Image (spheres, coloured by chain):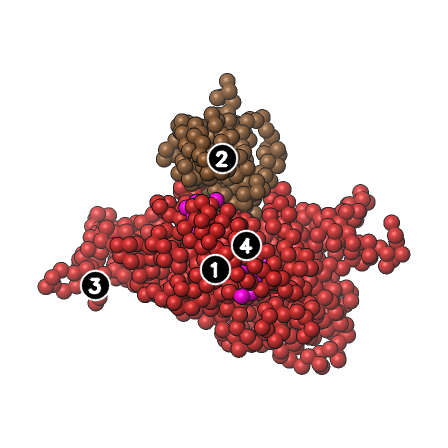
Amino acid sequence: MSDKTDITLTVNGTERTISCVPRKTLADALREDCRLTGTHVGCEHGVCGACTVMVNGAPVRSCLMFAVQAEGAEVRTVEGLAPEGGLSELQQAFIDNHALQCGFCTPGFLMLITGALEKDPGMSDEDLTEVLSSNLCRCTGYRNIVRAALAAAPAIRARAREAAA
Amino acid sequence: MTPDDTTLVGRSVPRREDRALVAGQGRYLDDIASPGGLHAAFLRSPYAHATIGGADLDDIRAMPGVVAVYTAKELAALLPGGQRLATGLPSSSIAFALDRPILPEAEAVYVGEALAMVVAVTRAEAEDAAEAIDLDLDPLDPVADLESAARDDAPKAHAHLPHNRLASFGFDYGDIGAAFDGAAHVVSRRFRIDRGGAHSMEGRGVLAAPDAMTGRLSVWSSTQTPHALKRHICTLLARDEGDVDVTAPDLGGGFGPKLVTYPEEIAVAAAAQALGRPVRWVEDRREHFLAACQEREQLWTVEMAFDAGGRILGLRGTLLHDHGAWTARGLNVPYASGMMLPLMYDVPAYDLNIVVTVTNKTPVTPVRGAGQPQATYVMERLLDAGARVCGLDRAEIRRRNLVTPDRMPCPRPLKLRSGEPVVLDSGDYPETQRKALDGIGWDGFETRRAEARSRGKRLGVGLANYVEGTGRGPYETVSVRIARDGRVKVNTGAAAMGQGVGTALAQIVADHLGRAPATIDLTLGDTREPYGFGGFNSRQTVVAGASADAAARIVRGKVLQVASHLLGLPGDALDIEADRVVVRGSNSGQSLSLAEIATASEGLPGYRLPGIETPGLQATERVLVEGMAFANGALAAEVEVDEATGAVRVARLFLAHDCGRMVNPQMVDGQIMGGLAHGLGNALYEKMSFDDEAQPLTGSLADYLLVSSAEMPVIEIAHSESLSPQNALGVKGVGESGVIPTAAAIASAVEHALEDLGVEIAEAPLTPQALHAAIRAAKAAKGDTT
């Protein structure tokens, strides 16, 4: 159980090789081996969604995925949402709409929303709102998260369509 | 300075906390790196009650990565100041002490209690080893049921106890016998409120790191009360207070349970000190379900007497309160329930007996609301029952009994736990109720209900009034100092837990010192300051806010005195704008920077201080607060009930709310909405289930349901601002507000939707199974067996 395996994956555009025991989750590997602590672990049961990251363009629960399963994958975390020092439209919308309080669930929501819209830019506002029920927040009562998601959605959709074109 | 259009207080200033948090640059407990650090894991009791025998630890010590293994015996050597946490608030009503051991030696008293600790190189290795410990446990009869726990023939939750009644006390005023003798109507009911958890998204966690060079012990903990943790560490580890630092990093939510000091925090600090290496423990969700404090389980047997006009004559009964297995905070929760029950209505006679029982369950301490949601539920359910027997509209019976604004501040025949009299400080309760009724469309609702019924849908509307006791004293320390570089340094015992208290305090301070929050540097939960409390009881904006306001006012005076001296102008000709002192209404360009003034204020060898009596631009204030600032609200709820399944859909919530002056209205709304979501969980979903051996049946978020965005109804909030005379800013707290009335208002609405069936709601949460059973029972009673 303690034999380590080398895994090569691309995280936020940078290729990395890390050495992990097979039972290590992707969430722990990102936090401990890549020192990207913006991905948070809230329940380790795949329920709360705080650990949501994008793997090959789709939002996934990184607590339910082993790091070794990410061999060769493109992983994107909250640290990769915007260029160094900047904020994505969605991050700014979270601030503008008071869509966070303690902030622990926030990276998971940011990755969920960004991932869902990038994957399916045609997703309706109603479907987007439905997707938000995948993740849990104890502070905000969700209303402002919905507002932030809807405010930033046009910009994310436009960029996703541009990238696909 | 009186808040007005130009002040920051009262404005939705963007939160200073947010930028880092949205970028993934927050610094929560488990984000703190500790090179060479070790990980702790705990063996937890699988039984609710068992005697603890021995274990062979040699095999465990030989497991991969294991550095040390501790049971109570090994840990005792590391705790020269004692092995129990004395965290309870004092009360003469407590029959016997139940201070928690750091690790119990002879007896386990709840499922999840930490019995042994392993320290290893990785967390996985620590968990493997903890799981492998074969501790000899011999099960004893558990006390699983609150009701039977109080009886003399019940098993004892701790083998040595004479009985399980930790405390019996009560509230008693007026002539209760006469009230009931002369009543036109009496309603008698039993209400059961279930246990739930806090479930901050981040669990508890602690990291302790000894410094070999200095001997200091640095501790980071995800706690609401770093000062209390520091005191306990210094006591139990016998360390000087100058040699221990406790810091609360960013908290991923608190909601109550993080206000008490826990055994894990002490055990980890002791092990780190003994091993000379950093040791970390981070609670996982399963542990949060088992070992983080919980709340709410109460059983009420109460009756209320009314005159023919629906005026309350008296209220009496019994409250059985589940205390859990240890005293981790005291009697504050049941005390709050008993005190709040009659508070906002005129109840001329009151007699409540409270029995606090020890059970073999996770210890009970405040979870957001702290006894107030239960009291509100009971009072509002009784008023709905009273409305029926008196033949009054549910809103009308409330209006006839609410304390009126002409009597504010209104002394009540009740006492705070300090012995101080309870005085409702301000607010217009009938007007607040009226706004909620208007907001939900109470008067036109019958038409809508009938129309929906004709389409086969059952709609209902409900109402609950409440007050929230906020701003618990005695004080919180705030120091304000202008550093030599002109930055405003604010240090306080107030602790952040995600609610944005830093933003609020910066607004309050900045109003006196240039109105530019960006010039302010905050240190929250500062344990270098010897006197402080931290975050609980919706207190910090009120209590720390009062000290911040006072300290900043003094520093402003000093700034202007020095500037006046340096510029040769009277102080009242000067003002502070951003980081400069300027001449009011002048375009002379004459000004001084705060940096220049701060430097001058330190003095020069051989010269007099520039216009001030003591050097520096600094003030430390601890404004004493005796009474409480009572926020109030009225929540109206609209629901749709599925008669066939017992499912309840909450369609709308309209909250009329008054928390005095709002420092930051957007953050006030955020607090309220989060509270309403938690309250919705308490109303319908959140239930900590146990079997009859007190074994938890809900151990993950897949079976204990937190509200998600899908369950959230439309929420509207209407604010009033009745300033509190309790503090200079007129503010009241808001942290627990939304959670208090929700279960009551929803129960009221569900009853309304099922009015023709005569279904009465007497439990929270109201699960579909429970409601379905109640609907069937009501139908059977009417001879309808469909």
Instruction: In the rendered structure, find residue B71 and report the number of the disc placed on it.
Output: 1
Q: Position of residue B708 (x, y in %)?
A: 60, 44
Q: Residue at x 21, y 67 (%)?
A: B613
Relative to B493, residue A94 above or below: above
Amino acid type of the residue that numbered disc 3 sits on in the rendered structure: Pro
Look at the numbered disc 4 and give the secondary structure of its residue. Answer: loop
Instruction: In the rendered structure, find residue B134 and report the number of the disc placed on it.
Output: 4
Instruction: In the rendered structure, find residue A22 and report the number of the disc placed on it.
Output: 2
Asked if badge 2 and badge 1 are on a common chain, one would say no
**Chain corresponding to brown in the figure:** A
Amino acid type of the residue that numbered disc 1 sits on in the rendered structure: Thr
- Toward the viewer: B469 or B696? B696
Foreground: disc 2 or disc 1: 1
Counting residues from the start of the chain, the first of labels 3 and 1 encountered is 1
First to last magenta residue range: B106-124
Counting residues from the start of the chain, the first of labels 3 and 4 encountered is 4
Check if residue B123 falls in the magenta segment: yes
Q: Position of residue B143 (x, y in %)?
A: 65, 65
Foreground: disc 3 or disc 4: 4
